Image: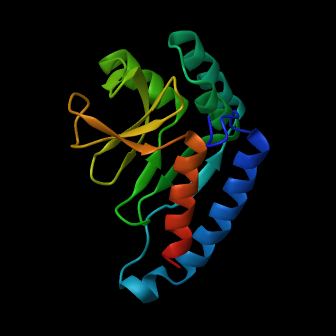
């Protein structure tokens, strides 16, 4: 859920993809000149038929929060290794693999959450049934988590600002 308590809107996610991809193009065009080394592969990858099937399988596997389902109907995954210390929105198939291996994570006062992203330092991001996004305090599935954003939309807004602010 976003700040107003509404569900994540797929059109909003599409707009986020367009804005973030445009900001990434600008960032990558000057990256070598600015940093002295070439950038990695930075991309927001839109959903495909295969990723949609993986989303369906994930929904069948676990009680996935609705905002995460909406996210995966639009985005297949995102890899942003050169934005700050890196941000990665995992594919639905990766989330399912991790859920099979580790299960859900325990976060604050939410009963459990599904890990769907990570950063370049190995910290995990998980979304709970409440819609809140949590970040692991250490690079561990089993340590404490703290609130990172009030919603998946808030998380995406934060990542989008970090891309734009790095330009």
Q: Is residue 92 above or below residue 14?
A: above
Query: Which residue is situated farthest in the top direction here?
Result: 60
Query: Which residue is situated farthest in the right direction here?
Result: 11
Side (left or right) of 123 relative to 71: left
Query: Which residue is situated farthest in the bottom direction here?
Result: 33
Q: Nearer the viewer, residue 131 or 116?
A: 131
Q: Residue at x 36, y 85 (%)?
A: 36
Image coloring type? rainbow
Place of residue 109 in the rendered image (x, y in percent of width and height, measured from the top left): 36, 24
Q: Nearer the viewer, residue 24 or 109?
A: 109
Q: Is residue 49 above or below residue 61?
A: below
Q: Nearer the viewer, residue 32 or 102?
A: 102
Q: Quadrant of residue 56?
A: top right
Side (left or right) of 74 relative to 106: right
Q: Residue at x 26, y 30 (%)?
A: 141
Label tally: 0
Q: Quadrant of residue 25?
A: bottom right
Q: Residue at x 60, y 53 (%)?
A: 44
Q: Is residue 117 above or below residue 69?
A: below
Place of residue 87 in the rendered image (x, y in percent of width and height, measured from the top left): 43, 54
Q: Is residue 74 above or below residue 157?
A: above
Quarter in which the N terminus is drawn: top right
Q: Residue at x 30, y 20 (%)?
A: 102
Place of residue 122 in the rendered image (x, y in percent of width and height, measured from the top left): 28, 46
Side (left or right) of 93 relative to 142: right
Place of residue 32 in the rendered image (x, y in percent of width and height, measured from the top left): 44, 83
């Amino acid at each position: 859920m976003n700040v107003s308590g509404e569900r994540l809107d797929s059109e909003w996610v599409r707009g986020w993809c367009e804005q973030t991809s445009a900001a990434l193009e600008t960032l990558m065009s000057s990256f070598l000149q600015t940093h002295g080394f070439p950038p990695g592969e930075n991309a927001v990858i839109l959903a495909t038929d295969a990723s949609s099937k993986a989303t369906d399988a994930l929904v069948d596997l676990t009680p996935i929060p609705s905002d995460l389902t909406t996210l995966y109907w639009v985005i297949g995954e995102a890899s942003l290794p050169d934005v700050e210390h890196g941000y990665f929105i995992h594919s639905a198939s990766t989330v399912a693999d991790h859920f099979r291996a580790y299960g859900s994570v325990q976060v604050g006062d939410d009963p459990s959450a599904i890990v769907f992203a990570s950063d370049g330092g190995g910290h995990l991001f998980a979304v709970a049934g409440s819609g809140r996004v949590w970040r692991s305090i250490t690079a561990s599935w089993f340590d404490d988590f703290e609130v990172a954003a009030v919603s998946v939309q808030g998380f995406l807004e934060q990542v989008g600002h970090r891309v734009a602010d790095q330009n």
